[in-house]
Image: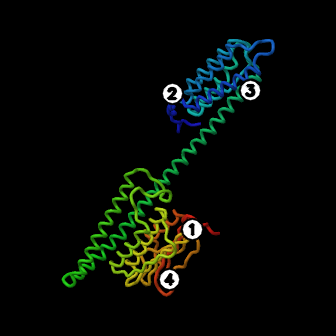
Amino acid sequence: MSTHHRPLPPSPGADGLPWTASDALLAVGAAALDLIGYTLGGPDGSQPIALTALVLLVLAAMPLLVRRRYPLASLAVVLLLGVALNLSGPVPNHFNSTLCVALFAVVRSRGVAVAAAAAVVAAAVPLLGRGHPLPPPAGDVAANVLAAALVIAAAVVFKRWQHEAEVRRRLLADRAVAQERRRIARELHDIVAHHITTMQLMAGGARANLGRDTEVVRDALVTLEGSGRMALREMRQLLDVLREGDASEEADRAPSAPQPGVGHLGELVEESRRAGLPTEFAVLGEERPLPPSTGLAVFRIVQESLTNTRKHAGRAEARVRLTYHPDRVTVEVSDNGAAAPADTLVGAVTGAGGAAGPRAGRTGYGLIGMRERVALQGGSIMAGAVDGGGFRVVADLPVAPADGEERLG
């Protein structure tokens, strides 16, 4: 037993009373058990059942309504009414259910010294009264001591279990906060890395063509302006999600603000082309709406892959393929460049792995973010060098089959 981690007082009931419905049910149950025990094992056949004893047994259960808020006072009233019951007539030694519940509440909410003193008093008081000789028989003393010890043991075990459950709850809450922070960092990385890279390339292209080709400069500045506007919009959406203060798992529901999805892949590919990376885009299979979280994952995977290609592949061409299957969607981004990217993921979250190639380098935040997104969706991802040159990222994400289709396998 410990004085630490004392339970907080329970909240009042829905009707404003200082007890809850469970408190009332427990008090009624304890009173019913004590009444049954008294009528069956109380006075012998020559003595009638006393109405006063029945009333006192019911009254003794009433303090249990507030036992969690006032445990010591509740136990004291139960013991006083027990003495009154002993004085009302010849009642056998009784360590009844009401006394067990009251003592349990004290041990659970108080320290070692108070709990030990309460247990001694609770074991001794039922031995006092009419019909109880002094000193009491050793058998009655042993029975009460054993009953008090069992109550203490049960309270200690429950208290420890409650503390461990609270620790687990806090750990889960901390884990949820850490996961939300990683999600925010992943979103920030995707937004900044993609748009800032595009803006840097466009600014460099505009500077190189100053005074020579005004049309090229104009197109570069238009793209630069659009990329900056898109970055600000996505940052505002992310900040709106943070201001809500209602963190939830990305795989369970879509963020409240509109997020990009597979419908925006065409714009992403077109932006990549304007940034100087020839990009081919193809959609295979029967298109159908995807869950918002899945669509966002596909968009970010393509966005990060094209950003890495522009940053590290040199003069290259890229290809984006989105394939719809009955129960999943596959996105593949590949290029024919030769330079090594700054961040490379080799292997898979689930499924087959891959071998490191000439473009394999250190693991960075971009592909780690891809891996985390795919893991949240329960899918698999593989990224690595392609034989003959180039780099490829393939992600396979499960989705529910379309209406009328059956899941195979």
- Specify which label sits upstream in the sequence, 2 or 1: 2
Q: Does the rendering let one see residue 231?
A: yes
Q: Are marks 1 and 3 in contact (CB under 8 Å)?
A: no
Establish if 6 lies above or below 304: above
Q: Residue 237: x and y, percent? A: 36, 59
Q: Secondary structure at mark 3?
A: helix
Residue 388 position in % (x across, y down)? 49, 87
As drawn, is 35 to the left or to the right of 328? right
Q: Which mark is residue 143?
A: 3
Task: Write down the residue under mark 1.
Answer: 327
| Marks 3/4: CA–CA distance | 80 Å
Q: Which mark is residue 17?
A: 2
**Amino acid identity at mark 4:** Val
Instruction: Find residue 217 and report its image quarter.
Output: bottom left
Q: Please state which of the two labelled residues, at mark 3 or mark 2, is closer to the viewer.
A: 2
Check contact, mark 3 vs mark 2: CB within 8 A: no
Which disc, if any, is residue 386? 4
Question: Does 61 sit above or below residue 259?
Answer: above
> Which residue type carries mark 2?
Leu
Q: Secondary structure at mark 4?
A: loop
Around disc 2, counting alpha carbons within 10 Å, would you say few (fewer than 14), some (14 to 19), or many (20 or more)? few
Which amino acid, by three-letter code, is at mark 3?
A: Ala
